[in-house]
Image (cartoon, rainbow, N blue to C red):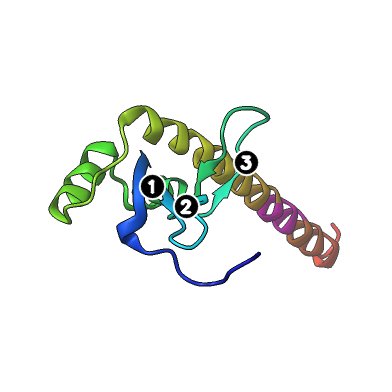
């Protein structure tokens, strides 16, 4: 029998924190079955190991964009009364988003080089020949 409805917070009996995300284990009050509830979507990062939580990767990306690091992120989350991610998790997510940023930057640079090269050819073709 499949019942639809909300799982009450009062039935949470376990929480596992993974950086800024949590995994709750909640008992269904109707059937007694244990349910796992994630507070963030996940994604595959690499060929092995557990999935990474999106919120942790986004936090690492935001710190890189803002020019800050793990210590500043921890200060911000502490001011918001949110537990932060440890430095190992942060570093792994920083490497993940750093690699993605480098790939995008390389494509962007190549595109700019090709555009400049095309523009140069046009200038050389239209210039008077000596």
Question: How busy is the neighbourhood of tag 3: few (under 14 within 10 Å), some, or many (20 plus)?
Answer: few
Q: Is residue 122 above or below residue 49?
A: below
Q: Is residue 67 above or below residue 6?
A: above
Inter-mark Cα distance, 2 to 3: 15 Å
Query: Mark 2 = which residue?
Result: 38
Instruction: Say left or right for 45 vs 26.
Output: right
Name the residue nearer the viewer: 2 or 119. Answer: 2
Inter-mark Cα distance, 2 to 1: 6 Å
Query: Mark 1 = which residue?
Result: 22
**Quadrant of the image for the N terminus?**
bottom right
Q: Position of residue 45 (x, y in %)?
A: 60, 37
Which residues fall within the magenta stretch? 111-117
Taking the magenta stretch, the answer to whether it contains residue 82 is no
Question: How busy is the neighbourhood of tag 2: few (under 14 within 10 Å), some, or many (20 plus)?
Answer: some
Badge 2 or badge 3: first in the primary sequence: 2
Which tag is nearer the camera, tag 2 or tag 3? 2
């Amino acid at each position: 029998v499949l019942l639809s409805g909300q799982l009450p917070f009062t039935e949470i009996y376990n929480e596992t924190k993974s950086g800024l995300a949590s995994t709750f284990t909640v008992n269904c009050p109707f059937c007694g079955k244990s349910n796992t509830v994630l507070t963030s979507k996940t994604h595959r990062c690499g060929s092995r190991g557990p999935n990474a939580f999106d919120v942790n990767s986004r936090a690492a990306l935001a710190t890189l964009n803002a020019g800050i690091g793990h210590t500043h992120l921890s200060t911000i989350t502490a001011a918001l009364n949110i537990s932060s991610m440890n430095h190992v998790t942060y570093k792994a997510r920083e490497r993940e988003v750093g690699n993605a940023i480098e790939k995008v930057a390389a494509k962007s640079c190549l595109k700019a080089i090709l555009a400049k090269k095309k523009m140069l050819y046009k200038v050389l073709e239209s210039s008077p020949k000596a």
